[in-house]
Amino acid sequence: MTRTRQDEKMPRVFPEEVAKFIKWVHETKDEGAILCFLPGWKDIKSVMEHLEDILDRGTCLILALHSRLTIENQSKVFNTPPLHLRKIILSTNVAETSVTIDDVVYVVDCGIHKEER
């Protein structure tokens, strides 16, 4: 899901591959929310677009968790979806240490995060 080419210094996310893996988890694993850690807003939006293209809209609730969103939109990740929907949350690693989402069963971590030094 992440690769580094020899001519690139920074690893990068391949959104289509991440979306395909999330789809695989969704289609092959028991119920429970999926939380995917991505490095930033651009990657969150890109993976979300790919998921919307490849998943049946009637089976998933795809949500983003990022500081760019309103508190109202961020708080949607804590709501329990209807029984027939699997919740998929795309977030930066901020949710890794500061947020607990009770119904998350599966975690997809791209292994890349932004860090200020």
Image (cartoon, rainbow, N blue to C red):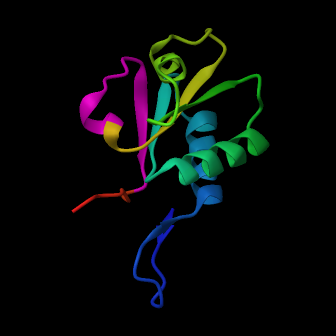
The foreground one among 30 and 72 is: 72
Q: Residue at x 53, y 22 (%)?
A: 31
- In the image, farthest residue toward the bottom: 7
Q: Is residue 9 left or right of residue 116?
A: right
* Residue 81 location, quadrant: top right
* Position in image of residue 112 (x %, y %): 38, 59
Q: Residue at x 52, y 24 (%)?
A: 70
Q: Is 12 colored magenta in this rendering?
A: no
Q: Residue at x 41, y 44 (%)?
A: 92
Split into 4 quadrants, where in the image is the C terminus?
bottom left
- In the image, farthest residue toward the left: 117
Q: Is residue 52 left or right of residue 80?
A: right
Q: How many marks?
A: 0
Q: Is residue 1 left or right of residue 105?
A: right
* Position in image of residue 34 (x %, y %): 49, 32
Image: magenta residue range: 95-110
Query: Would you place residue 63 above or below residue 23 in this image?
Result: above
